[in-house]
Amino acid sequence: MQEKDLIRYIKGEANPNEKQSIIEWIKKDAKHQKQYNILKAQYVASNLDLLDDTETNTAYQHFSSKRAANKKKYYYPVAAIAILLPLFTWYVITFSENNSLVTNTDFLKLDTQSIVTQYGDHKTIVLPDGSTVILNSNSSLTYAKNFSDTLRTVTLTGEAFFDIKRDTTKPFIVHTDQLKIRVLGTSFNVKSYPVDENIETTLVTGKVEVLQKSNEAPIVLAPSQKAIFDKEKKDIRINEVDSENVVAWKQGKLVFDKTPLKQVVLDLKRKYSVEFIIESDSLLDYKYTGEFDNLGLEEVLNLLKLSSSIQYTFKNNKIMLSSE
């Protein structure tokens, strides 16, 4: 296993298939576990001082408030890093040498859980605070087995519906590839697949803040609003949507509203685990509107054919799409 692949996994950038392969590789041999733990220790230590200033200060203030009133408060994050780095490195190396084959460590509350779904699969996850997440196909969710005293954070690759328990003392934060979504208690949908052109956040109930960069003002969504982040243009637009259609995938439905065909086939691939090839250039600009309510693949293809100018053929276990 190459070091760059392990770093991608540690940073939460690996896709679900890569994550599964890396987890299996780590568990296969104690030497693999040791290599992973040391690499993770080095990465975490190098990034401790890169935390958002607000989050670092919140955690520090919470820690400081518990100190005795007569103690001098000369404890800064840099000092903490200097003290904790050798302890953390010693911890992971020692446990690796004792053949403790755990994928993640639980020192400094870094013990995490990763849930992965395959094509056509959904999973319901109950988080440590009692919040629930429904994970769509070909997705992954990583979170701490025990949230901190100040924050509840998760990392998402793919799509998920979140129903978050309200806690004004602990904001809930979803990290995606290029965005951060912050809430106190609400229900919302996040779609952030690496191959998609956009990252979408749709609010169902409550209120969420969408942040592109830590130094920019957040975008606040109201119910039935969708924030669409264009990865290439690096900008966000807000659309009014029917939120029930957006989250219809939870009931096995796919609802499209003037959706580019190249996005339609990506969603179909995730649901039916089959590869689509768009052969006609004219179809790249085609936008499809329609609903597939728990249909089989052949039913979907026939409906596409009947309701549009799309023709399909099977070739080498792939579905070839062309225009009439």
Image (cartoon, rainbow, N blue to C red):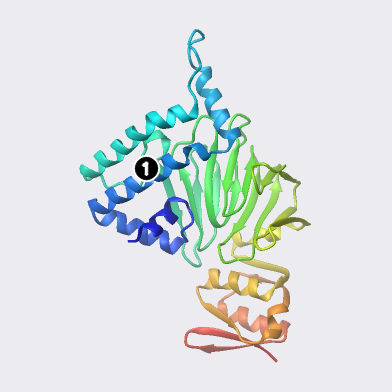
Residue 13: x percent and y percent? 49, 56
- Check disc 1 and report the residue beneath it: 41
Residue sitting nearer the eye, 182 or 63: 63
Q: Is residue 284 left or right of residue 174?
A: right
Residue 179: x percent and y percent? 62, 51
Q: Quadrant of residue 20?
A: bottom left
Crowd around label 1: few <14 · some 14–19 · many ≥20 (10 Å): many
Question: Of helix, strand and loop, which one carries label 1?
Answer: helix
Looking at the image, residue 45 lies above or below residue 282? above
Q: Quadrant of residue 216?
A: top right
Q: Is residue 280 left or right of residue 83?
A: right
Residue 315: x percent and y percent? 51, 89
Q: Residue sitting at 57 percent across and 29 percent down? A: 57
Residue sitting nearer the eye, 159 or 301: 159
Residue 157: x percent and y percent? 53, 56
In the rendered image, the residue lying farthest to the right is 240
Residue sitting nearer the eye, 88 or 225: 88
Which image quadrant: the N terminus?
A: bottom left
Looking at the image, residue 136 lies above or below residue 109? below
In the rendered image, the residue lying farthest to the bottom is 324
Q: Amino acid at mark 1?
A: Ala
